[in-house]
Amino acid sequence: MKKDTVIIIPAFNEDQSIGLVLHHIPRSRIQEIIVVDNGSTDKTSKIAKDHGALVVRENQKGYGMACLKGIEAAKKYNPRNVVFIDADYSDNPKEMPLLLAELDKGADLVIGSRTLGKAEKGALLPQ
């Protein structure tokens, strides 16, 4: 299978979850996993590197700035697909193939939802 996808994971002090997120990402189509450390003071960067991710740092705080830094880093791979996954495991990385399947069918953009389907009441509280 062609490796045509870059994963971007914005992260701030997520050393309790980043390893699990990285472990559960299906790798068959992945060119690179980019973790954007947004000024963490914990071991987020070390854990991400230990799991084989490329870690880039964005010191200007904010999710949007981290996403933009990730896009900038992804450009050199010229990926067909870019997938954003949250570092706190609020997105299930095992479901990424479902998103990619829709892109393969011709969709320009696919957005996953944590509120559709079987989400239990209170399941979307901040992690």
Image (tube, helix red, strand yellow):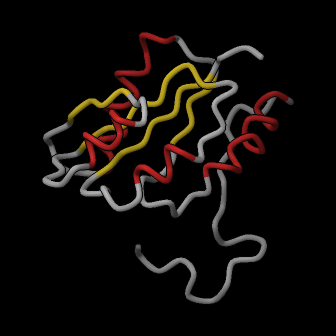
Q: Quadrant of the N terminus?
A: top right
Which is more toward the observer, 107 or 41?
41
Residue 117, image x, y percentages: 78, 72
Determine which quarter of the picture holds residue 47. Answer: top left
Along the horizontal axis of the image, is 45 left or right of 83? left
Which is more toward the observer, 33 or 47?
47
Residue occupying the point 66% across, 38% down: 26
Q: Quadrant of the C terminus?
A: bottom left
Name the residue at the right extreme.
Answer: 105
Residue occupying the point 52% across, 11% down: 78
User: From what the image shows, is residue 87 above or below residue 5?
Assistant: below
Residue 4, image x, y percentages: 64, 18
Name the residue at the front extreme.
Answer: 50
Residue 41, image x, y percentages: 13, 53
Along the horizontal axis of the image, is 63 left or right of 31? left
Determine which quarter of the picture holds residue 106. Answer: top right
Residue 123, image x, y percentages: 57, 81
Counting every numbered tag in the picture gives 0
Along the horizontal axis of the image, is 53 left or right of 20? left
Which is more toward the observer, 28 or 103?
28
Name the residue at the bottom extreme.
Answer: 121
Along the horizontal axis of the image, is 91 left or right of 36? right
Determine which quarter of the picture holds residue 121. Answer: bottom right
Residue occupying the point 66% across, 54% down: 112
Residue occupying the point 42% across, 49% down: 19
